[in-house]
Amino acid sequence: MGTIDLDFDRKHIWHPYTSMRDPLPVYPVKSASGVYIELEDGKRLIDGMSSWWAAIHGYNHPVLNKAIEQQAGMMSHVMFGGLTHEPAVALAKKLIELTPEPLQKVFFSDSGSVSVEVGIKMALQYQQAAGHSEKHRLLTLRSGYHGDTFTAMSVCDPVTGMHNLFSGVLPQQVFAEAPRCRFHETCSDGCIEDFRRKLETHHRELAAVILEPVVQGAGGMRCYSPDHLGKVRELCDRYGVLLIFDEIATGFGRTGRMFALEHANAAPDILCVGKALTGGYVSLAATLTTEQVAGVISEGEPGVFMHGPTFMANPLACSVASASIGLLTSSDWRKKVLNIEKGLSLGLEPCRSFRGVADVRVLGAIGVVELENPVDMAAIQKSFVEKGVWVRPFGKLVYLMPPYIISGQELTALSNAVCAAVGELSPGNG
Ligand SMILES: *Cc1c(COP(=O)(O)O)cnc(C)c1O
């Protein structure tokens, strides 16, 4: 018997998207180090999830530990109203340097969803200050995911998003078809046509377009052509609509570029980052915007940007984020991500011929096996744990996004486990 009270957990603690009446089993974790998650019973699992895109350097990293310990010795937190500190300034400098040149103003917040709310609020305040209060709706792509708070929910895919029960109270946004072009293809006029038409029809009431560049994450794990992104930028300029990129999942190297927008050389008016920002240590997010957007907001009524979370720019979070970015930029992360891309392409390829598999796709350190039917989550989870890996599918998607530090051998073990688990789903697969 372990010491973690699973019975109490089951009775009293909500886990993500779970029932309190009939919760799925959860596995008690004792510790995590490098690419391994150690369960309470001593079993070690190779991590295939980076704790939802975040732990890019693996767990318990000495450099990140030291950054957070040193900062804790100075101050864990002070309010950001009327005060500032070195961790915030140092991190903002790094973010401005890493992101496209027009992005010069940084707003720190505590989670990805909040950074999306902040980005949308910036767009609305901008339009209002510019004398266009009628421009208050958003245009987005189907199959997107932007978080679980209310306005973020309103731009998640209305079908795969888990939010249709709130549809009566959410702001009604405009949805365009998700791009059909795949990553390596060019985007035809037909592919962008629905988006173009929606923009043309609605631009007078649109504050901004929001989308995930090149890779749509939790809304469907789809990759699309950077060409599409370039066309979106052009169309937004033509119709006077701001463009928000949500790089909360794709940021910090995951797609093979520091930010996915680099595949298209496209700069947004507003950029949201989170998840891997702190290397997965603590929750922190940021919303960046341009001189122009910040200028209009600051000159209009009420002359200030109306947001200010209690834990804004938390020094522990900012310190570990700077250390994580330092680790990344001083390493050969491009080569590591490229090696993971090669390993995943090779390792997941056998799944393609399995019965019940609809598609296999890999980009950067992201590998996806899309099934024809949703998986039995509890059963496949158990099967993965028995195989010594931590992989958490959702719906029809079994996917991997391992920490960048994973070795070739560990990556092979991970891919083999996915092939084996997917193979077991349909009789007759080898
Ligand atoms: C995870 C995610 C969010 C929400 O971030 P939280 O930190 O969970 O609030 C928003 N957008 C994208 C693309 C994400 O992957």
Image (cartoon, grey):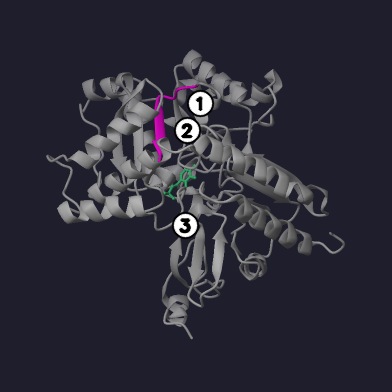
Residue 83 sits above or below residue 356 on the image: above
Lower position in the chain sequence, tag 3 or tag 1: 3
Amino acid carrying label 3: it is Gly
Q: State the residue position of label 3.
A: 34
Q: Secondary structure at mark 1?
A: helix
Residue 213 sits above or below residue 413 on the image: above
Answer left or right for 345 relative to 111.
Answer: right
Quadrant for residue 326, please give it. Answer: top left
Dots 3, 1 in contact, CB < 8 A: no
Q: Secondary structure at mark 3?
A: loop
Q: Is mark 2 within 8 Å of ligand 1?
A: no
Give the residues in magenta: 266-273
Give the numbered dot on residue 262: 1
Q: State the residue position of label 2.
A: 258
Quadrant in which the C terminus appears: bottom right
Residue 123 image offset from top left, x and y in percent: 37, 29
